[in-house]
Image (tube, helix red, strand yellow):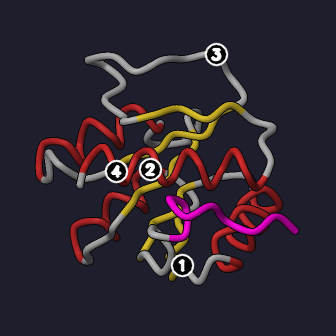
Amino acid sequence: MLEPTQQESSVQRKRILLVEDDLSLREVVRELLIIDDHSVVEANNGAEAFGLFKLHQFDLVVTDCRMPFVAGNELATQIRLVAPQQPILMITGHRTRTSASNPVDAILEKPFDMAQFRTAIADVLNIRN
């Protein structure tokens, strides 16, 4: 297993909202986050995630792009209305980019490895902090 770089280890132990409708992928991503001592709250879709977001504070939101009920870009838009500085990382298997209609801080394309995931998290948290 790869050890985190100094920049990456400075962003360990964060409270993360993980939004992914694919259960097996969500479990894998959760385990990757737990390896770095993050506290993970999971949501199956954007609607469930926004409900959790309104009730709790998170250091980072990691969301899939295409999901039932509320897609990742719609979730990001809703979050930006109530918390404009909230760090948001999108993970997706579809070509997409940040824009006014997709106001995430960064996009990580699937499949990704642990090093890429750690770097993306560190980058997003450093953008917003």
Distance from disc 4 to disc 3, alpha carbons, whole Å, reads 24 Å
Q: Which residue is mark 1?
A: 38
Residue 116: horizontal and vertical position, in percent? 69, 44
Q: Answer with left or right where residue 1 lies relative to residue 26.
A: right
Nearer the viewer's eye, disc 4 or disc 1? 4
Could you tell me the amino acid type at mark 1? His
Cα separation, mark 1 vs mark 2, equals: 21 Å
Going from the N terminus, do you reach mark 4 or mark 3 first?
3
Left or right: where 23 falls relative to 121: right
Q: Nearer the viewer, mark 3 or mark 2?
A: 3
* Residue drawn at the location 50% of the way across and 59% of the way down: 7
Task: Say what secondary structure mark 1 lies in.
Answer: loop
Give the x, y percent position of residue 22.
74, 52
The residue under the point 80% across, 48% down is 113
| Three-letter amino acid code of the residue under disc 3 | Arg
Inter-mark Cα distance, 4 to 2:
24 Å
Which numbered circle lies on residue 126?
Answer: 4
Single out the mark in the foreground, 3 or 1. 1
Residue nearer the viewer, 112 or 45: 112
Question: How many numbered circles does the render carry?
Answer: 4
Amino acid type, mark 2 = Gly
- Residue carrying label 2: 46
Q: In which image quadrant can residue 9 be found?
A: bottom right
Q: Are marks 4 and 2 in contact (CB under 8 Å)?
A: no
Query: Residue 95 — which label?
Result: 3
Q: Earlier in the sequence, mark 3 or mark 2?
A: 2
State which tag comes first along the sequence, 3 or 1.
Answer: 1
Asked whether disc 3 touches disc 2, contact meaning CB atoms under 8 Å apart, the reply is no
Up the image or down, 29 lies above or below 76; here it is below
Among the two numbered marks 4 and 2 on one chain, the one whose residue lies closer to the N terminus: 2
**Magenta span:** 1-9
Q: Is residue 99 magenta?
A: no
